[in-house]
Every structure is written in C-alpha cells, then in structure tokens.
Image: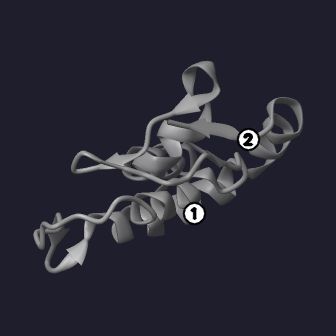
Amino acid sequence: MKGFICCVLTLFCFSCATVKTLDPPLNHVEIAYKGKESYCKNIPRIYSGISYNACLFYGEPSSEKNIDAINNVPIVLIDSAFSIITDTVVLPYTIITQVNKGDIRVN
C-alpha cells in the first residue's frame, strides 16, 4: 500500500497541469504560454490536465521558434503523458466535481 501511495504522489508531482486544474481557486484557471493567451473559454474537470495542455496549443500564434524541451521532446507532451495517468487516477473525484461545479473557467 505504501508503494501505491508513493507512485500516486509521484504522478501528482510530474503532472503539473492536473495539479493546477484539480481544484482551482474560484473555479478559474489562467492558461498562457510565453505570454500568449489561450482561446479556450472553459475546460471540463474530467481529464482537465489534458484539456489544459491542449489549450496551451490553442492560442495566439507565437513568433518564437524556441520551445521548452527535454531531448527535443516538448515539455507539454511529457506533462501530457503523466497527466493522462493522473487524470485517470482522480477520475472518481473529477466526475463528482464536474456534476456539482461544472466546467472550469479560463481567462
């Protein structure tokens, strides 16, 4: 059981998008990448980490060619892989909060 808890806590540390959207203050989250705003107006709570990362790509175009990456793999893609797992682990919680609170607003 201790190993399972350690694995879950490790996933939470790596999946930053899921942690940001799990229970945002005032049902609001800000999505921007390198100062460019996202066109998303809201995201669902169910698989919110993946939705958050998708909204990072759906925004104002950037003239910069420089993307944050590790070994030529964009950090957003690495975070998305961990977010899929973490979003699935917290699915029972996010289903209940989606029904009770609705979507998360994006500004």
Kindly identify the residue that appears in the image at 12 percent across and 73 percent down. Answer: 65
Image side of residue 68 versus residue 90, left or right: left
Estimate the x, y position of residue 50 in percent, counting from the top left.
55, 61
Quarter of the image for residue 104 reads top right
Structural distance between the alpha carbons of marks 1 and 2: 20 Å
Q: Do labels 1 and 2 touch, CB within 8 Å?
A: no
Estimate the x, y position of residue 102 in percent, counting from the top left.
80, 37
Image side of residue 67 versus residue 31, left or right: left
The residue that label 2 is drawn on is 103
Bin the neighbour count of mark 2 within 10 Å (Cα to Cα): few under 14, some 14-19, many 20 and up. some
Say what amino acid the circle numbered 2 marks. Answer: Asp
**Closer mark to the observer between disc 1 and disc 2:** 2
Estimate the x, y position of residue 86 in percent, counting from the top left.
57, 55
- Earlier-in-chain disc, 1 versus 2: 1
Say what amino acid the circle numbered 1 marks. Answer: Ile
Q: Considering only vertical position in the picture, is 27 above or below 48?
A: above
Nearer to us in this view, 105 or 23: 105
In this rendering, the count of numbered labels is 2
Q: Which mark is residue 21?
A: none
Secondary element at image label 2 = loop
Kindly identify the residue that appears in the image at 80 percent across and 35 percent down. Answer: 97
**Which residue is the extreme one toward the right?**
99
Secondary element at image label 1 = helix
Estimate the x, y position of residue 3 in percent, counting from the top left.
52, 50
Q: Which mark is residue 85?
A: 1
Kindly identify the residue that appears in the image at 73 percent across and 41 percent down. Answer: 103
Q: Considering only vertical position in the picture, is 39 above or below 45?
A: below
Bin the neighbour count of mark 1 within 10 Å (Cα to Cα): few under 14, some 14-19, many 20 and up. some
